[in-house]
Amino acid sequence: MTALVVANALLWALVIVLAIVVLALVRQVGVLHERIAPAGALMLSKGLKIGELAPTLKVTDLNERELALGGPRADGLSALLMFVSPTCPVCKALLPVLTASRRSEQSWLAITLASDGDLASQKEFVASHGLEAFPYVVSAPLGVAYQVSRLPFAVLIDEKGVLRARGLINSREHLESLFEAKRLGVASLQDYVEDANRRLP
């Protein structure tokens, strides 16, 4: 009987110790979560500067509609130029995110997809992924004007034609970081976090 009481007491002590360890780990995870900066779009050091007027180009989309990309918009919307390619696996993975963003952000944002290359493969890409709702532009000069070197790449221009954010986009978080950067009035979330850290005592 004594052995049973001792064993029971030891088990309870072990449960209490384990509960304390778990609580300590949970607290540590919370601390780490606060310290980890949000993952923003990868900004490239070269290229257009945030806050400058974006280059304006007249282009024609796959539906033969003439578009002026980069200048002030009469409808008061900001513009997201998303550079993609039919041969880019990451671009294809991001298409559902872009479709969802087109619906959820339509009150302030117009999204245009851009690419270059063979027209037939571009039209097949649009048809096979259900991208007919997007203006889709095939223009090498557009990519050159915005100095796009890698894909997928996004450029966010405000309603006045000012470049607000740009960078490589590999996930939903990267795309949403451009929206948040515009809202905060910073070039990128990384800049915002670094500035906040510098102001800490």
Image (cartoon, grey):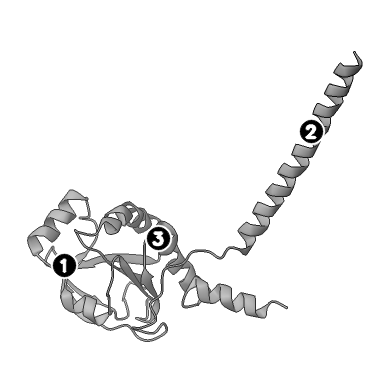
Q: Residue 61 got which mark?
A: 1
Indicate left or right for 21 with 83 as reference: right
Quadrant showing the C terminus: bottom right
Furthest residue toward right: 2
In this view, the residue in front, 36 or 75, is 36
Kind of residue at badge 2: Leu
**Element class at badge 1:** loop
Residue neighbourhood size for the residue with mark 2, other residues' Cα within 10 Å, grouped as few (<14), some (14–19), many (≥20): few
CA distance for labels 3 and 2? 52 Å
| Residue plotted at (32% across, 66% down) | 110
Q: Residue 105 got which mark?
A: 3
Residue 79 position (above or below residue 96): below
The x and y percentages for residue 141 are 18, 79
Quadrant showing the N terminus: top right
Furthest residue toward bottom: 52
Q: Residue 20 got which mark?
A: none
Residue identifier under label 2: 14
| Residue plotted at (24% across, 82% down) | 145
